[in-house]
Image (tube, helix red, strand yellow):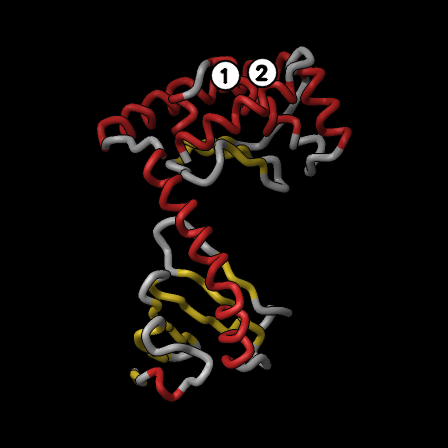
Amino acid sequence: MNIFGLNTNRLFRTDDFLMEKCEGNKRSLFHKEVGEIVYTRVKRSRSIRIALRPGKPVSVTLPCHTSYAEADKLVCEKIAWIKEELQKIREYERTRRHFSEEDIERFRTQANQLLPARVAALAARHGFSYSKISIKNIHSRWGSCSVQNNLNFSIYLMHLPDDLVDYVILHELCHTVHKNHGPKFWALLDAVTGGKARQQAVLMQKYSARIF
C-alpha cells in the first residue's frame, strides 16, 4: 500500500482532501466532509460514474483507459452534489424504521409459515404458475421473479397490511407472464387486483421509505 500527500495532486485543495491511498486496482481519497471516496477501474465500464449508497463510501467507477485525473476532475465538479445527496441519505437513515433481532426472527418465522400457502392460493385463483419460492432477509426489495419464474420474497412483508402483502405477491406472479413493467404488465396487475394496481403501488412506496 502506498500513501501519498495530496500536494502531489494539483486538482485538489489540501484543506478539503486529506489523504490518498492506492492498493491494487482501487484508489481512495478522503474528503473532510464527504469522507472516503473509492475509485475502481472496471473493464466493462464506458464512462465515469459516481454512486452513493447508505453505509458505503462514495464509489467512483471508471473505464480502464480513463486516467484518475479525469475522474478527479468530475469528482471536483460534483462535490457539492455529492454532499447534498449524502445529506439526503443521512436523513433517510435517521427516519428509516430499524428492527431488532427479535423482530427479524419473528418476521422470518411468520413469512415461512404464511407466504408459501398465500402464494399458492393466489396463483391458483388467477391461473399463474411458478417454479419455487425463496424467503429471505432482503433489504433492497419486497420481492422478485427470476427468468426461470422462481419467486423471492422479503421477510419484511410481514410488516405490511394483508392487502399489500397480496399486492406484492400478485406483482411478482404477473412477472411470470411479463418480465418488464410495460403496459401489458400493468394491465394484468390491474385486472388481478380489482383495478387497484396504481393505488397500491403508491402505498408501497410509502412503506418502502419507512422500512428500506
184 left or right of 210 in image: right
Q: Residue at x 53, y 68 (%)?
A: 77
Q: Residue furthest right?
A: 184
Q: Residue at x 64, y 20 (%)?
A: 197
- Badge 1: residue crowd in 10 Å (few <14, some 14–19, many ≥20): some
Residue 50: percent from left, percent from top: 51, 62
Residue 80: percent from left, percent from top: 47, 60
Q: Quadrant of residue 126?
A: top right
Q: Residue furthest bottom?
A: 8
Secondary element at image label 1: helix
The residue carrying mark 2 is 122
Residue 74: percent from left, percent from top: 54, 70
Marks 1,2: beta carbons within 8 A? yes
Secondary element at image label 2: helix
Q: Residue at x 49, y 75 (%)?
A: 72
The residue carrying mark 1 is 118
